[in-house]
Image: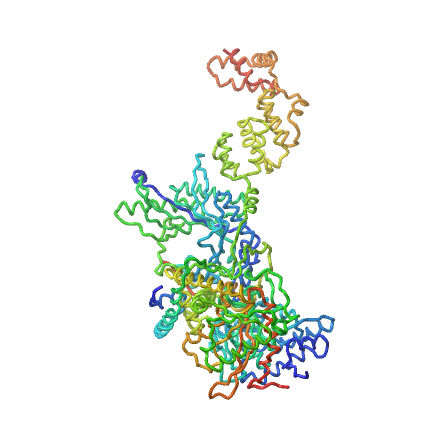
């Protein structure tokens, strides 16, 4: 298995460093060299941290030499630029934070660093995590490594692309309505969103507080499990993080699905998605059966209301969360004669159109006279959606469905906001219910008139706190089908 | 839930975002479009259901009353868009006359 | 004229107080909760509202509010939560304040208060809830530090995030005096509970008043105005009186009261309208998704209730009602718990509240002032004092000797009985002995006796003084007076 350093998985790199077969410095150098090679075409990073990463690598090497064994020793890590890392520019892909340096580090990132991972850069995202293609970034363009004329997905497009393009072994993103799973599907990588509350949000710049979760983007399920194991767990700095022991997931991942019942959702009829897409999912479901799973028809009657529910709750919370960006204490400012005008001008200049739209609709949904009709009603619909899943999980162990309605689309293909919102159709319901869910590569389609095959993702969702089951199932599927290995990215790979 | 026309200017004022006339119109149309879709929620019978307060219920998450080191003033003020000595400076707050 | 109109109207007043809680740290982060200090030196990502920061609730602050609620007899609902109050202002780090909207920590309750004349009254509470304080802004360029006419403002976030308790009263107060009495009782109670320093001059107690008037006898509420910027109890008194008078004048001259906020101008003794040209605030309250609800078990509440100290109003009521202490002195005792407890121990041991009052609040307090030693920390134990009182009541010693003994007790402690015995200070009540003293003095002062009989009756005092001197102060004064009267004729 003589693969180049950049093609190795996190598990392999850590093993190599811990055994002294190679150093963390070498792994980081290789990653940074790759960044230098492909970044101009991919544009995954907003900030590359060469010096910091090299310094960190030296420190890790010393610790390993001193006898420490770290689960992610020397593993190059790409961090979505909505997570604070001390001393690094942290922008959320927005002009309003274009020159802001974080004075502290997000708990999740700190834990990964403690486990030996090395942050090599901050990745591009849809501004403030609002979007499904990365096109809403005000600070950069990221292209899908598998077809540079297409989007990498969003909002964690940069992290997905960095991992897919071999610039980093692992990445972390944030998922509010699908922002890890969808770019994972678009970029041929695992995109995993844990149960709400499993990973601390402290240091994750908030979009929708009751939905946001940090999760890994990796090339293998085992790597996703390693990253999750290192990050998950109660954090007193985040009152919504759950105080429950974390069951380690990386060991004992499943190889077979026999005995498991998998639910196929009646409302998610893939025939609506076109023949070639339908074929991919059809085969995927059959593969599950071949692995021993029993497929059952389940119903999520309120799943169709997911979009409407989400596009009231998330904007409402974000309208409040983004009020702090006012030019007073940090961030960019546009001067004015009085402070209220200063707010208005600062925010007008600092926020892009999608962010403005969501703040406006959110403000409206919370405003006097509309609060009950919109916000409260949406929170009630959310309860119904969660109950639908509960009922389904009484019959099956987990659910399988598409991660996205199509493979990656071309730039500007979804200029109408609502058509973009539709990209979250399959991922939103799980977010609303707080369930752990992930996307795993499940096949390829070559669009008509296109030359390059595009990856697609199969989504699994499991009951609350069933990360071990979820990753186990994904691993079994991944091992048996190996879809991710079938094609190389357009930007190639060394080795 | 009616298909109200949103008073975009009023909402933008509440949200402290200055909008051009063009934006008022464009956002008005786009948000109206979104609201049309959102109004579908009206078909759901939510009468017997509580609003989700938390996805995973928990209670009484509190921290002890113990002092933790603060940020240094240099760190705090270093990125102040406008500072005057140890203070953050803002343009005049219009008095409520 | 003013009196006539005053009796034609009734003032209706509600008080809203913000109380900074005395915790070591802020409400949602571990920054120190201290008054003063260099600006922006007690801040962190959380209380500065930095991107990515999250609040974590201070359990001590929650407990303080519950204690206050229980002390005022409020209901503590089993379930309570935090909400976001959204509005933009430079001293708001997040441009929303974490507060409580529809499920506050306490509901109802009442503040009992007392007036200068000792009469008691009460005002019910609507609720007490918990929220975080804002930063502080100072305004420059207007010449007098006011917001109006200022060119720019400077903001200090040290205070941002300090836990704040908001107490809202029902509009059941009807005079400026009662408003101050209410505030005094509230302040004293919170001080006794140890939940706040409640110092208006430091900003740990702030209050606004809602004032309206209505025709006497009416039960409908008139239009109210909100009075702000009162920085002392004296300001509160003056401002409310001023506003009542202003409202009466408006109505008397045929005008209407406008519902508005008015700021008290201490210098000129008037209120100014602070009517805002802007839209009324739409706070868009919604439950804060970063925090989880608070739930109380009956055991927890019982345990807190059991740890409450005696409340000031109750002590005042007992002191004035049971022991007949004057209202002013009773108030002093309420403010000096150690002294009050000392006093009550003396009462209990001696069963003579009147004497206890005289000695504790009179002689001992005087000694305490002179020597700068608090009574409760002096060498005079309550039991010793009770003993002294017993000796006085039994007429074993007279009041002058008692004062001497007290002086000795103050300096050296010990037992009054022993002192009297050892030094033979017992009063001489034997009529024959006293008569001899009287006769001796009368014999030695024939001219004075003649003056007395000639009509200069005030010289009797001199004679009494001489008799006391001769008897080394031990003659029973009552007997002396009796005998002297008989002999002088």
Q: Quadrant of residue A118?
A: bottom right
In front here: C301 or A48? C301
In the image shown, does B57 or A448 lie closer to the viewer? A448
Task: Tally the marks.
Answer: 0
Q: On the picture, is C262 further left or further right than C350?
A: left
Where is residue C341 drawn, in percent x and y? 57, 35
Residue C308 seen in the figure? yes
Q: Quadrant of the C terminus of chain A?
A: bottom right
Residue at the extreme left of the image, as rendered: C254
x%, y% of residue C303? 57, 44
- Decide which of A399, C411 is in the foreground and name it: A399
The quarter of the rendered structure image containing the N terminus of chain A is bottom right
In this rendering, the answer to whether A477 lies above or below A487 is above
Please tell me whether residue A336 is drawn above or below residue C384 in the rendered image.
below
**Residue B48, image x and y in percent?**
43, 57
Residue A203 seen in this snapshot = no
**In the picture shown, does residue C351 fall above or below A328?**
above
The way the protein has been coloured in the rendering is rainbow
- Residue C3 in percent (x, y) is at 32, 38
């Amino acid at each position: 298995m003589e693969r180049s350093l950049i093609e190795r998985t996190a598990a392999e790199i850590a093993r190599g460093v811990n055994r002294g077969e190679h150093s963390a410095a070498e792994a980081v150098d290789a990653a940074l060299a790759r960044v230098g090679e492909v970044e101009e075409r991919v544009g995954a990073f907003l900030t590359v941290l060469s010096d910091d990463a090299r310094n960190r690598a030296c420190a890790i090497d010393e610790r390993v030499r001193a006898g420490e064994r770290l689960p992610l020793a020397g593993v190059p890590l790409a961090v979505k630029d909505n997570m604070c890392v001390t001393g690094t520019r942290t922008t959320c892909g927005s002009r309003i934070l274009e020159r802001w340096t974080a004075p502290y580090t997000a708990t999740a990132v700190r834990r990964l660093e403690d486990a030996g991972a090395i942050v090599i850069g901050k990745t591009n995202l849809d501004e403030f995590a609002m979007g499904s293609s990365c096109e809403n970034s005000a600070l950069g363009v990221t292209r899908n490594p598998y077809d540079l004329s297409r989007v990498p997905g969003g909002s964690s497009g940069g992290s997905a692309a960095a991992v897919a393009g071999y610039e980093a072994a692992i990445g972390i993103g944030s998922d509010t309505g699908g922002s890890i799973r969808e770019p994972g599907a678009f970029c041929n990588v695992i995109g995993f969103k844990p149960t709400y509350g499993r990973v601390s949000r402290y240091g994750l710049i908030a979009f929708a507080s009751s939905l946001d979760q940090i999760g890994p983007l990796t090339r293998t399920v085992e790597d996703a499990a390693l990253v999750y194991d290192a990050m998950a767990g109660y954090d007193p700095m985040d009152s919504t993080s759950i105080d429950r022991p974390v069951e380690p997931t990386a060991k004992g991942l499943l190889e077979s699905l026999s005995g498991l019942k998998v639910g196929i959702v009646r409302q998610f009829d893939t025939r609506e998605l076109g023949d070639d897409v339908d074929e991919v999912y059809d085969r995927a479901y059959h593969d599950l059966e071949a692995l021993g799973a029993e497929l059952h028809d389940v119903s999520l009657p309120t799943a169709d209301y997911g979009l409407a529910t989400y596009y009231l709750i998330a904007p409402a919370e974000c309208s409040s969360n983004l009020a702090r960006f006012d030019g007073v204490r940090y961030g960019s400012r546009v001067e004015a004669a009085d402070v209220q005008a200063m707010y208005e001008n600062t925010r007008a200049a600092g926020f892009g159109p999608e962010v403005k739209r969501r703040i406006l609709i959110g403000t409206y949904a919370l405003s006097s006279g509309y609060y009950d009709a919109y916000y409260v009603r949406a929170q009630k619909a959310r309860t119904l959606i969660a109950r639908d899943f509960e009922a389904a999980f009484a019959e099956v162990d987990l659910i399988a469905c598409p991660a996205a309605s199509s493979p990656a689309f071309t730039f500007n293909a979804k200029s109408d906001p609502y058509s973009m919102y539709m990209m979250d159709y399959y991922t939103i319901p799980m977010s609303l219910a707080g369930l752990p869910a992930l996307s795993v590569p499940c096949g390829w389609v070559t669009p008509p008139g296109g030359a390059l095959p595009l990856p697609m993702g199969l989504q699994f969702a499991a009951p609350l706190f069933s990360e071990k089951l979820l990753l186990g199932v994904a691993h079994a599927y991944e091992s048996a089908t190996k879809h991710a290995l079938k094609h190389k990215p357009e930007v190639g790979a060394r080795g | 839930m009616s298909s109200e026309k949103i008073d975009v200017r009023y909402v933008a004022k509440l949200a402290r975002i200055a909008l051009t006339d063009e934006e008022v119109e464009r956002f008005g149309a786009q948000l109206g479009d979104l609201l049309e879709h959102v109004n579908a929620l009206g078909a759901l019978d939510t009468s017997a259901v509580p609003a989700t307060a938390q996805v995973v219920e928990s209670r009484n998450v509190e921290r002890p009353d113990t002092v933790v080191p603060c940020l240094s003033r240099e760190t705090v003020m270093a990125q102040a868009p406008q500072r005057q000595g140890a203070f953050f400076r803002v343009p005049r707050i219009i008095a409520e006359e | 004229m003013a009196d006539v109109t005053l009796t034609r109207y009734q003032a209706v007043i509600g008080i809203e107080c913000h109380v900074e809680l005395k915790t070591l740290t802020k409400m949602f982060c571990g920054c120190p909760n201290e008054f003063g200090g260099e600006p922006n030196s007690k801040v962190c990502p959380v209380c500065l509202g930095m991107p990515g920061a999250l609040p974590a609730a201070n359990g001590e602050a929650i407990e303080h509010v519950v204690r206050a609620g229980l002390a005022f007899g409020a209901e503590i609902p089993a379930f309570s939560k935090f909400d976001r109050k959204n509005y933009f202002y430079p001293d708001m780090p997040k441009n929303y304040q974490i507060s409580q909207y529809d499920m506050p920590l306490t509901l109802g309750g009442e503040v009992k208060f007392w007036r200068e004349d000792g009469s008691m009254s009460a005002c019910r509470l609507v609720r007490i809830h918990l929220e975080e304080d804002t930063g502080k802004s100072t305004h420059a360029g207007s010449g007098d530090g006011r917001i109006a006419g200022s060119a720019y403002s400077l903001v200090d976030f040290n205070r941002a995030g300090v836990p704040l308790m908001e107490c809202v009263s029902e509009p059941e107060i009807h005079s400026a005096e009662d408003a101050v009495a209410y505030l005094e009782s509230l302040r004293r109670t919170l001080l006794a509970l140890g939940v706040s320093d409640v110092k208006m001059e430091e900003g740990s107690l702030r209050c606004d008043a809602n004032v309206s008037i209505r025709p006497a006898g009416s039960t409908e509420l008139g239009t109210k105005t909100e009075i702000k910027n009162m920085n002392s109890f004296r300001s509160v008194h003056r401002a409310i009186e001023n506003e009542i008078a202003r409202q009466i004048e408006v109505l008397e001259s045929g005008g209407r009261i406008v519902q508005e906020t008015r700021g008290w101008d201490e210098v000129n003794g008037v209120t100014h309208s602070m009517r805002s040209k802007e839209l009324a605030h739409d706070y868009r309250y919604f439950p804060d998704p970063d925090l989880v609800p608070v739930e109380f078990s009956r055991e927890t509440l019982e345990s807190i209730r059991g740890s409450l100290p005696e409340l000031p109003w109750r002590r005042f009521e007992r002191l004035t009602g049971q022991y007949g202490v004057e209202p002013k002195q009773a108030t002093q005792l309420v403010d000096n718990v150690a002294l009050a407890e000392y006093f009550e121990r003396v009462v209990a041991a001696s069963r003579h509240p009147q004497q206890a009052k005289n000695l504790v609040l009179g002689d001992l307090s005087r000694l305490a002032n002179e020597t700068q030693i608090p009574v409760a920390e002096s060498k005079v134990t309550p039991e010793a004092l009770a003993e002294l009182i017993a000796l006085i009541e039994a007429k074993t010693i007279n009041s002058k000797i008692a004062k001497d003994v007290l002086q000795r007790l103050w300096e050296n402690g010990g037992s009054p009985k022993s002192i009297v015995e050892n030094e033979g200070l017992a009063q001489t009540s034997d009529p024959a002995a006293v008569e001899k003293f009287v006769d001796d003095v009368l014999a030695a002062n024939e001219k004075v006796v003649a003056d007395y009989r000639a009509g200069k009756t005030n010289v009797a005092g001199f004679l009494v003084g001489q008799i006391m001197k001769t008897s080394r102060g031990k003659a029973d004064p009552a007997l002396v007076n009796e005998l002297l009267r008989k002999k002088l004729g």
